[in-house]
Image (cartoon, rainbow, N blue to C red):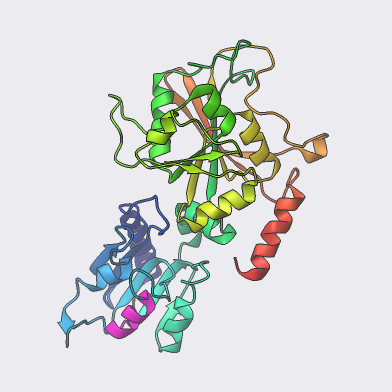
Amino acid sequence: MIERQQLEQAMRHGLDLASRGPATGDNPQVGCVILDSDGNTVAEGWHRGAGTAHAEVDALSQLPQVDGRPDARGLTAVVTLEPCNHTGRTGPCSEALIAAGIHEVFFAVSDPGLLARGGAERLAEAGVTVTGSLLADEATEFLRVWLTSTRLRRAYVTVKWASTLDGRAAAADGSSQWITGTAARQRVHEQRAANDAILVGTGTVFADDPSLTARGDAGELMEHQPVPVVVGERAIPAAAKLRRHPAGLIETASRDLPAILGALFDRGIRRAFVEGGPTLVSALVAEDLVDEYAIYLSPTLLGGDKLAIGDIGVTSMPGIKRLDVRSVEQLGGDLLLTARPVRGGAGLDTRASARRKANERTGA
């Protein structure tokens, strides 16, 4: 009999395997470890990207074959996410496990996807012993971005800004280059490369003509480039640098933020990095559409009225937007503060709360 400690060790290894897969795109990072009856690892796998074998199938492919199929009889699969139960670019993992004769399946987190969920139920129907929630907290944190995006059916939004300690994003004359130093600016490029899309408003495009590419230390283009998304109704100039972006360009011709984020989800975009100015940032905060903050703080003072964030609809202290600081990192002389909204507490936008409740009722 496999001991709990062995199962947890296998699940943590599965999470490590999952981290080897791409974080961007519409597929979750998933790892799978297959154990024998003594708890020894006999196969392992992870998902390497859209169109490739899922983690379970990748692991099964390492097993001996009987009659042209992997032989998993008497074996236990430990998977970081509930095996999928639908046919997309690949077949359902639940059916692959059943066909291989898997004896037992442990998974960490249930799949919230409208199409993919139900694998645990299908496995149980076929006589496979299934147990969920193994190291659920650790796996949920690992899959936080994908799970949030899938449950809300919109892109996960990380808002970034750089400011002085007194909250200013620009000087009185409008100049803003450079508030932070080179180490902080390079980290921004790394964060761009870790996202599917980068959002700005039309005001930023007209004022700054940004390129919004992800570049390395020497100015070279990084392997992954987020697609720029321009929020606003004005068409950007034909000569704008964004029209030559290597990932293309999305012009929303809209200021309806929930609709825009939902449309990005439908395009397969799960991670949206926002580098817009105070107008776009404030609108996202006011509508409770921000999932994470990346705030770069320079140990400087500017004064004046060029704030990094404007009106967010808070008129008195009971409506304050509270944040949970997750980390503080020093980058040269600057600080990177990573924080998340405190959901369900003071300052929670009632419209967004109603939207989430409606999504939960419909299974979205």
Image spot of residue 139 (x, y percent): 45, 58
Residue 6 screen position, x and y as percent: 34, 66
Q: Does any portion of residue 40 appear in the rendered image?
A: no
Taking the spot 43% from the left edge, 33% from the top edge, the residue there is 242
Foreground residue, 10 or 50? 50
The residue located at (58%, 45%) in the rendering is 291
Looking at the picture, tell me which residue is in the foreground, 310 or 72: 310
Q: At which x and y percent is residue 332? A: 42, 19
Q: Relative to 359, does residue 327 appear above or below in the rendering?
A: above
Q: Quadrant of residue 363?
A: bottom right
Region of the chain picked out in magenta, as a range: 92-102
Q: State left or right for residue 162 relative to residue 248.
A: right
Looking at the rendering, in which quadrant would you find the N terminus?
A: bottom left
Residue 104 versus residue 206 in the image, above or below: below
Residue 224 % position (x, y): 33, 42
Q: Is residue 260 covered in magenta?
A: no
Name of the residue lying farthest toward the front: 238
> In the picture shown, does residue 124 fall above or below 168?
below
Residue placed at 51% from the left, 23% from the top?
Answer: 208
Look at the image and tell me whether residue 215 can be seen. yes
Q: Is residue 96 magenta?
A: yes
Secondary structure mostly seen in magenta is helix
Please state, as top left, top right, bottom left or bottom right, where the C terminus lies in the image: bottom right
The residue located at (42%, 29%) in the rendering is 241
Above/below status of 288 relative to 112: above
Say whether residue 353 is left or right of residue 146: right
Q: Is residue 58 left or right of residue 201?
A: left
Count of numbered circles in the view: 0
